[in-house]
Image (cartoon, helix red, strand yellow):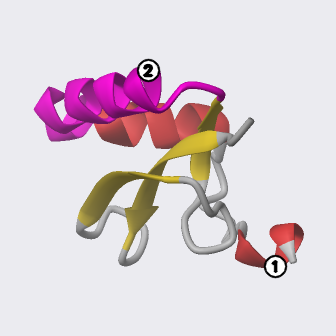
Amino acid sequence: MKTYYVYILASKRNGTLYIGVTNDIIRRVYEQFDDIEYAIQREKRLKKWNRIWKLELIEKVNPGWKDLYNDLV
């Protein structure tokens, strides 16, 4: 069974936000799902959120805006 992830990436703190879904978390980082349809639904919902909500979600999960890539490899 594949695992799917919804990710939010930022160009810098409070910079441009990128939201998507992937089955390769090394390439992208955020939320993990076992069902691609569920992951795509989450991605679509997040893309409709206003910027403040997205920033609040990031701050809740990663308050220091730490680059998480090195933790994965």
| Circle 2: element type | helix
Image location of residue 57, percent across then percent down = 46, 32
Image location of residue 36, percent across then percent down = 47, 33
Q: Is residue 64 magenta?
A: no
Task: In this rendered view, identify the residue nearer to me: 32 or 56.
Answer: 32
The rendered magenta stretch, by its main secondary structure, is classed as helix
In the shown orientation, is residue 53 left or right of residue 59?
Answer: left
| Circle 1: element type | helix
Instruction: Give the residue at mark 1.
Output: 70
Instruction: Give the residue at mark 2.
Output: 38
Name which quarter of the figure residue 9 lies in: bottom left
Q: Is residue 44 magenta?
A: yes
The CA span between labels 1 and 2 is: 27 Å
Task: In this rendered view, identify the residue nearer to me: 36 or 41.
Answer: 36
Q: Which residues are magenta?
A: 34-53
Q: Amino acid at mark 2?
A: Tyr
Q: Are marks 1 and 2 in contact (CB under 8 Å)?
A: no
Quadrant where the N terminus is found in the figure: top right
Q: Amino acid at mark 1?
A: Asn
Looking at the picture, does residue 18 appear above or below residue 50? below
* Residue found 32% across the figure and 35% down from its top: 43
Looking at the picture, does residue 10 appear above or below residue 11? above
Image location of residue 35, percent across then percent down = 55, 25
Looking at the picture, does residue 21 appear above or below residue 61? below
